[in-house]
Image: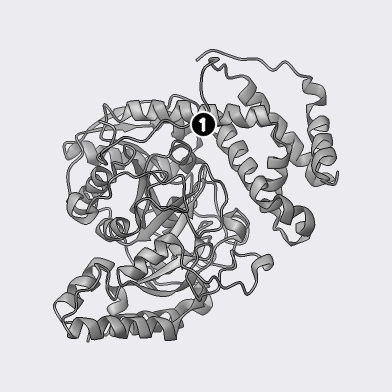
Amino acid sequence: MLTEAWKLTLSEGLDQMAEGKLSAAEWTQSLIGRIDALEDRVKAWTQVDRQGALAAAEKADTLRTAGEVQGSLAGVPYAAKDIIDIKGLRREAGSPLYTGYVPEEDAACTGRLREAGAVALGKVVTTQFANRDPSITRNPWNLDRSPGGSSSGSAAAVGAGMVPAALGSQTTGSTLRPAAYCGVMALKPTYGRIPRSGIVKVSWNFDHLGIIARSIEDIARLLEVVSGPDPGDQGAPDVVVEKYAETSTPRKPRRALFYKSDFFPRASDEVAERMLEATALLKENGVQVEEGMLSLNLDQIHAAHFLGRCVDSATYHEDMFIEFSDEYAPSVGMTVTTGLMTPAVHYLKAMRLQARFTEAMDAVFKKYDIVILPTQLEAPPPWEESTGDPLFNEQLTFSGHPAVTLPMGCGADNMPLGIQLGGRRFGESDLLAAARWCEEELGWRSEIAEPIG
Amino acid sequence: MGEGEFRGDADRLESQIEEMAHVVYGLPKNDLSKSVAKNVANQLLILSAIKFEKEEEPIRPLPPVGGRGVN
């Protein structure tokens, strides 16, 4: 048995199990040990299902020993953000209004993971209703800093080596930004690629489920399991689900569009410097990188996305908010209040702008393989102050195009920085292939954090 | 992209937004509602400055068929 199996990526663990060098139970037990060693400081979990996870892992081992055919993720441990239902585990969404709620069914995505043999290790912290009020979770790279949000626990747990992969969600920047802050990788797929049945909603128009892991191959393996239409989500179209782990073998992107002028005025100096280094590295390695600008400015995109998101949230929360407003954290209250104050015609102007911008981005991807932008404005803020600014994640969430974040080293204070790559809608194979090429050829890799502070 | 214009009463926008939410949804008027109304008014003015074509639909374009992107 490997004594430090918790260090394995998802794909490494699968390989070890296939070769008979590791059992699912050993892997799960090792991760539980890592959680027990760090959780009092990182505070990433709402519930660790030790008994259930070990039972599921032992079942996978028994079937493997018996030579039974199993799913593609048999024995693979994962965690889910606490807005996503897992049958029999608490789902509280960070709100006292849901204290003790236990769903009787899986969400579509977690049900598919169960079918594939994955082991639900537990639930990880979300900010309240996946909004922007800081959670208790700390950044494993520096416990005084924010792990980002709203998928705070997902990113922190993967970054700290407590679990190889976790599901998150993104309505503005809630998967990519936390992953970048915690030095790991993430995918915010095309809008509708992963069905949202069985999750607490923030916005019907902008909610995406996301995947956080420590390699792009890991993300591809999970994506091919959780994607595809579901009767519970009318926003998830019947677009073919590819074998993403196979179709995303590393491929160098030919042409890339770098949105320098849109983002540099608002990025910190170290983010801007690191982005220039990253794009220079891409050019040195044969990628044709051109500079361009978005078809709308950041303020216009923000106005439309912000009001649209808030109206959706207000519609979802209206009854509960009016009755229990004291139970809502400040940023959730502001979100709902904003939505209730937004005139209907302006809401539809926002949706018109979304349609226009989506079409414009579709046109960009007829010429370019990827677009490049920073994942974050600056280094993570102090954990109790903010989850950080999601401004640089808003554009591709608004348009619904897929985006990944890759670590590109650390800044002056030794906190991770991320680079964001975007791709064509439902073109996850090509986007992940480009990201895997960057990971392997340019060295943009994840490292496990050893918490200090 | 053409420019639109705000044809309302910008000076009363914040107070009327706050009043509308109070009348329609029963939201209390307080420091929070005033602060939020100010931000909403700013965002409305940004959107009002964008001109839309009459037939421009508020519906996201259909996804590509076939699964390998739009190209």
Q: Nearer the viewer, residue A352 or A393?
A: A352
Residue furthest front as drawn = A231
Does residue A425 sit above or below A193 in this rendering? above
Q: Does residue A412 appear in the picture of this structure?
A: no
Residue at x-position 20% and y-position 77%: A17
Q: Please give left or right for residue A187 compared with residue A389 in the image.
A: left
> Splitting the image into 4 quarters, where does residue A421 fall?
top left
Residue sitting at x 69%, y 47%: A336
Instruction: Write down the residue under mark 1.
Output: A298
Q: Residue furthest left?
A: A19
- Chain of residue at mark 1: A
Q: Is residue B45 visible?
A: yes
Q: Residue A135: x percent and y percent? A: 59, 63
Picture layout, residue A247 above or below residue A292: below
Residue A292 in the image: above or below residue A19:
above
Name the residue located 38 percent from the left edge and 30 percent from the top edge.
A361
Asked where in the image residue A65 lies, by quadrant, the reply is: bottom left
- Mark 1 secondary-structure assignment: helix
Q: Could you tell me which quadrant the N terminus of chain A lies in?
A: bottom left
Q: Is residue A370 left or right of residue A181?
A: left
Give coordinates of residue B11: x percent, y percent. 81, 23
Q: Crowdedness of circle 1 by 10 Å Cα count: few (<14), some, many (20+)?
A: some
Q: Residue furthest top?
A: B2
Residue A19 position, x and y percent, is 13, 77
What sort of colour scheme is used for the picture? Answer: one colour
Residue type, mark 1 in image: Leu
Residue A181: image location, x then y, percent: 44, 56
Picture quarter containing residue A364?
top left
Question: Residue A134 or A243: which is nearer the viewer?
Answer: A243
Left or right of A70, for residue A374 = right
